Image (cartoon, grey):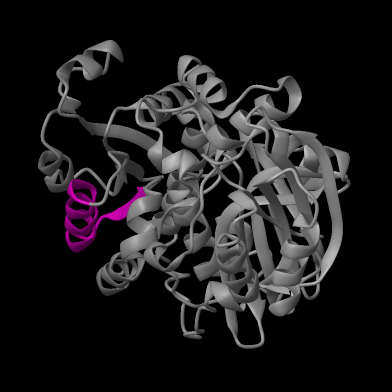
Amino acid sequence: MRTIGVGLVGLGTVGSGVVEILRAHSEDFSRRAGVDIELVRVADRDPLRGQALNLPEGVFVTDAAEVISDERVDIVIELIGGTNAAKVVVLAALNAGKSVVTANKALMASSGQEVMDAAAKAGVDIMFEASVGGGIPIIGPLKHSLVSNEILSVMGIVNGTTNYMLTRMADDGLDYESALAEAQAKGFAEADPTADVDGHDAAAKIAILASIAFNSRVTVDRVPVEGIRGIKPIDIAYAAEMGYAIKLMAIARRESDGIDIRVHPTMIPVAHPLASVSGVYNAIYVTGDAVGETMFFGEGAGSLPAASAVVGDVIEVARHIRSSCLNLVGCTCNEHLPLRDLSQLETGYFIRFAVADRPGVLAAVASKFGDHGVSIASVIQKRVCESGDAEIVYVTHRAAEGAVRDALADIGQLDVVTEVAAVIRVEDL
């Protein structure tokens, strides 16, 4: 059995997890998976990271080019992240005839076509299971186990930081700032949390999933995104009272006129399985025409969960090398479906206003909704704010996004309306 040489670029959280798994289980892989794998080269710009892992002498280098040029390396693992240096490493490795395993969601969501074309041209594998859902297997099932289905929708909770924050806000009444500070203190959120709390991390992941599920290339820059900065404890309380939970949802659906794709805070029924996904856990809900509804659940981040997916890909590539069948499943984005504009969306809406506490306000606001064909399902008025304004919540029946936005623009001009305080979409999944 030929030993498959592996080179690793990037010794951050996931990279160190990969070293740990290979160190603990590499001897088992020949028995369990029929391949013999050896970590022969590791690169990181920080020598201290290599020293901390006690790598064998001669394995650690500071230049990724030495990993790519090493003739013993059959598979390059890219774990440096980002879309600049990482892209250079990935394309260089592929062009050198090395298969690549990456966890880089940003790269695959923005330049996936270029990367997969380079792999096909070189006749090698590119695998990226860890780019979505950490240790949750989802890309493999979409490409293999569920390939007999027409996938109707793929949606879920794919960012652990925001899910942890919303869980703490729901369970313990924390406001956004307190929940974020706690997430940062526990290491669940970065010092700059923008990618997580503004939804960009989730957008990259749903772009990848939609591309695979619907066989049509979706890039992250085409995904409408809203984050959780505007969510208040009072919104979560209203949602709970109405039988909903608020989650940052990444949603992609196949529609008759294209792909409906978006990321935003969403009220979902508490009876739905996704509503009970709490803390840093992720869950991805897939509906196929034959299999029906399925859900993939687990830890979406962390050193060992993500490393588990990376090493799983390495073993699969090693099997392909051993049997001389590389690039079996390349790019399948051949349908070229259009993306629907967000204004075409039809769903329910939760809308919270601060208004003057005087007669006629309800009628004035309702009239503007009616002018734009937006039907009201319920109205709640419970409290007067410290400013003296009243708080009114409207929940609409299904309505077009464009009509709702036009109505809110008109309502915002009413002298009795102080603020449109919250607009949250409601999905009766």
All told, the count of numbered labels is 0
Q: Nearer the viewer, residue 72 or 308?
A: 308
Measured from the top left, where is residue 310 in percent x and y?
45, 41
The magenta stretch is 84-101
Q: Residue at x 58, y 46 (%)?
A: 158
Work out which residue is located at the far front of the displayed protein and give it: 359
Quadrant location of the N terminus in the rendered image: top left
Q: Is residue 88 magenta?
A: yes
Left or right of 266, for residue 263: left
In the rendered view, tell whether residue 330 sits above or below residue 103: below
Q: Is residue 259 magenta?
A: no
In the rendered view, tell whether residue 246 sits above or below residue 145: above
Q: Nearer the viewer, residue 36 or 121?
A: 121
Left or right of 257, for residue 62: left
* Residue 280 seen in render: no
In the rendered view, tell whether residue 10 sits above or below residue 46: below
Q: Nearer the viewer, residue 192 or 319?
A: 192
Measured from the top left, where is residue 135 in percent x and y?
57, 39
Q: Residue at x 44, y 74 (%)?
A: 217
In the rendered view, tell whether residue 262 sits above or below residue 342: above
Measured from the top left, where is residue 187 in percent x and y?
46, 20
Q: Residue at x 51, y 84 (%)?
A: 337
Left or right of 290, for residue 180: left
Magenta span: predominant SS is helix
Q: Nearer the viewer, residue 413 or 159?
A: 413
Quadrant location of the C terminus in the rendered image: bottom right
